Amino acid sequence: MRRILSRENLVEQMKRVEAALARALEEAGIAPRGTAESVQAALATVSAEEVYETEKRETGHDVAALVFLAARRGDEKARQWIHYGATSNDIVDTAWALVLRDALALLKDRLRGVISKLSALASETRDVVMAGRTHGQHAVPVTLGFKLANYVYELARSYERLCGVEKRLVRAKIGGATGTMAAWGGRGLEVRHAAASILGLEPHPITTQVAPRDGHAELSAALAILASQLDRLAVEVRELSRPEIGELWEDRGGAVGSSAMPQKANPVTAERVSGLARAARSLVTGFLENIVLWHERDLSNSSFERFAMPHLLLILDQMLLDTHALLERLRYSKERMTRNLELTGHTVLTEALMNMLIERGLGREEAYRLAREAARKALSEGKMLHEAAGEVPGIRSLLDPRELQRLKPENYLGNARELVDEALAYADKALNQC
């Protein structure tokens, strides 16, 4: 990702766009034959270092620096026709489209790896029973596979979002000053089509002097959503790795957890994911504000984008790498999950108990009252729910001990297995979108 976002690569992409424009001018019959070859040869003599040095020392403008340097070193055709009819953002925005195409390809590849690893873990643990939690409290049983499959589904939706935004964002911006194509004498559509085709891009149907910035804002929002999803997964690991829970943890081998406390095994990879997510989310507002430019263009977007876009892409790249590493090192304890269910006396099954009573003819309110009484008895006396329920007169008269014995977490999982399969199938389909 650093290579893709380097200044050197950006200049190389700008050179590709200038070369494509020269060929398009030639194909449209605006520039004479041989122009494209001359311009490409001239561009090949210019380095990124020279462009930025010339910008700093002479032009105060990166595209002008590139064009002037190439024109000085080229033959007569290059000097005459390079950059003909174009404006700076034809070059910059289209070069950035090429950069973003490569950056998104890398992020999507990283995300596919995370989803694949999560899917394998969800499949492996589809029958590992644990407490479901709402408000931080034991709710009803789930499986670890069910929990992880929810993340598979959410991340697959982010993959779909990236595919969607890519179609709208990664486009050629070829329109000249203010976007009207006036300099190309009525042949602007031909020039745009040819240049975009050479670069393997679809063109924007219409633009001002710059490509519309809603695409950048949409990308930033999609990446912030992805960052938040990765953060949610990281928080799950952090929470469940607490010593008093101990159901999930990151196995970092002999890594030092604390310089002062030798016993510590800190969830540092998950914590880094959470910290980086905050940085990703913080950048979205600036991209939204960049949509609001004066008339056909101003330059207020540029300084923010030059800073924020590389940072945002690098942040997500690191987060995806960290998440994949976290999943590779993720460990779980069936024993702790079982013990934690027993810690609350299987009171995660009070809904099941209530429903059994309703099925025996009780109204919901009375069934709820009796199930709650059984749960409180189990918790206060250190008993399992089925034992405590058998000692509540209103329950004992309706349910015999054999029926109450069925109150086990593994017997109250509903369609969890099938739901895991549906989530994994959804992800498989999503990953084939683009």
Image (spheres, rainbow, N blue to C red):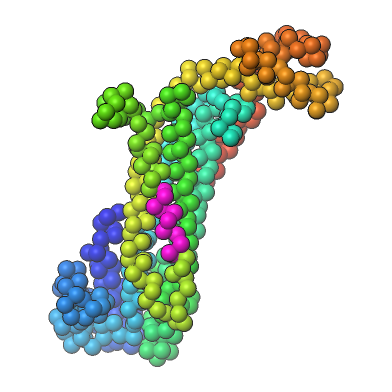
Residue at left offset 48%, top offset 17%: 335
Q: Is residue 5 visible?
A: yes
332 or 110: which is nearer to us?
A: 332
Which image quarter: residue 25?
Answer: bottom left
Question: In the rendered picture of this protein, how many numbered marks are placed on residues?
Answer: 0
Relative height, residue 8 to residue 316 (above, below): below
32 or 249: which is nearer to us?
A: 249
Which image quarter: residue 170?
Answer: bottom left
Residue at left offset 28%, top offset 30%: 258
What residue occupies the far bottom of the structure in this picture? Answer: 185
Position in image of residue 243 (x %, y %):
42, 24
Answer whether residue 284 is magenta in the image.
Answer: yes
Relative height, residue 156 to residue 134 (above, below): below
Residue at left offset 33%, top offset 26%: 264
Query: On the rendered structure, is 72 left or right of 280?
Result: left
Query: On the rendered structure, is 323 left or right of 432?
Result: left
Which image quarter: residue 361?
Answer: top right
Query: On the rendered structure, is 179 left or right of 49?
Result: right
Residue at left offset 20%, top offset 71%: 52
347 or 108: which is nearer to us?
A: 347
Relative height, residue 389 to residue 70 (above, below): above
The region drawn magenta spans 277-287
Relative height, residue 58 to residue 137 (above, below): below
Q: Is residue 352 visible?
A: no
Position in image of residue 363 (x %, y %):
84, 26
132 or 219: which is nearer to us?
A: 132
Position in image of residue 240 (x %, y %):
46, 29
Q: Quarter of the image containing the N terminus?
A: bottom left
Answer whether residue 340 is magenta in the image.
Answer: no
- Secondary structure mostly seen in the magenta stretch: helix
Position in image of residue 346 (x %, y %):
62, 18
